[in-house]
Amino acid sequence: MAIVIDAVYFPSDDIVAREIEGELIIIPLVAGIGDLEDELFTLNDTGKAIWKLLDGARTLGEIIQVLEQEFDAPAGEIQRDVLGLVQELARRRMLVEVDAV
Amino acid sequence: MQFDEPQLSVVYAAELPLSGFALLELMRAVLARGVPFRFKARGWSMAPFIRDGDVILVNPLQRDLPGIGAVVAFIRPEDGKLVVHRIVGRQGAAVLIQGDNVTSLPDGIVPQENLLGRVMRIDREGRSVWMGLGPERFLIAWLSRFRFLIPMRLRLALVRKRYS
């Protein structure tokens, strides 16, 4: 799936994600089951900050602007990393494009 | 604030220090989506039917309350902990729950809103086991409620040992 900076993304129905005791845990719903004995996923602090902004209301461009105000980073680095993470999440079907739903 | 490269990592439940509270929250989140939740059981309070380390599949509750004999995941009213035990009685919209291998008092009367899901499958060492979930569950519940289950199992164990 091509990632578009003007698009809006949202967590897909194929996962359950919860922040518990400081850890963001993502459980893929494989074959319609939330299986704690299968692969789970977590995001580091930066990943969590991005995930929380993927609320189905902001475009990626707006998310990048918010992060550029919160974090110190060289020009272009935040955009590159946000797009990279979103690409990875979309590839794993953890994110969907809102307009495509 | 430093912007570290965002990372999505694969982990396994055994690597995460999941507290009982965390497990409860994850179960609630998955069941609320209307899909089953599968996880490793801990403890011996339901032995021999569910043993420590068995992986159990919990289905979301249907509209009707599970019947006597059903093994359910619930929030124990006295301490708010996630527990998996058996329904041994009914009282209106509430149920009486007891662990099959518990000699102390039952978990007590548990209101319907504390019930989370019903155990539909038990996996042990790579294979499914069904003992305790089939029609025998009614007898197990009755024996458990009237405190015959553990003494009976002890007698059976002695007999097996004598003739083995």
Image (tube, coloured by chain):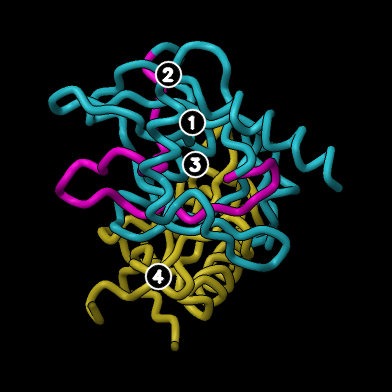
Q: Which residue in the structure is indicated by mark 2?
A: B107
The label shown at residue B124 is none
Q: Are marks 3 and 4 on the same chain?
A: yes
Kind of residue indicated by mark 3:
Glu
Q: Chain B, which colour?
A: cyan
The label shown at residue A32 is 4
Is residue B52 inside the magenta stretch? yes
Q: Are marks 1 and 4 on the same chain?
A: no
Q: Which residue in the structure is indicated by mark 1?
A: B83
Q: Are marks 3 and 1 on the same chain?
A: no
User: Which chain appears yellow?
Assistant: A
Q: Chain of mark 4?
A: A
Kind of residue indicated by mark 2:
Asp
Is the residue marked by circle 1 packed among few (<14), some (14-19), or many (20+) residues within 10 Å? Answer: many
Is residue A62 inside the magenta stretch? no
Q: Chain of mark 3?
A: A
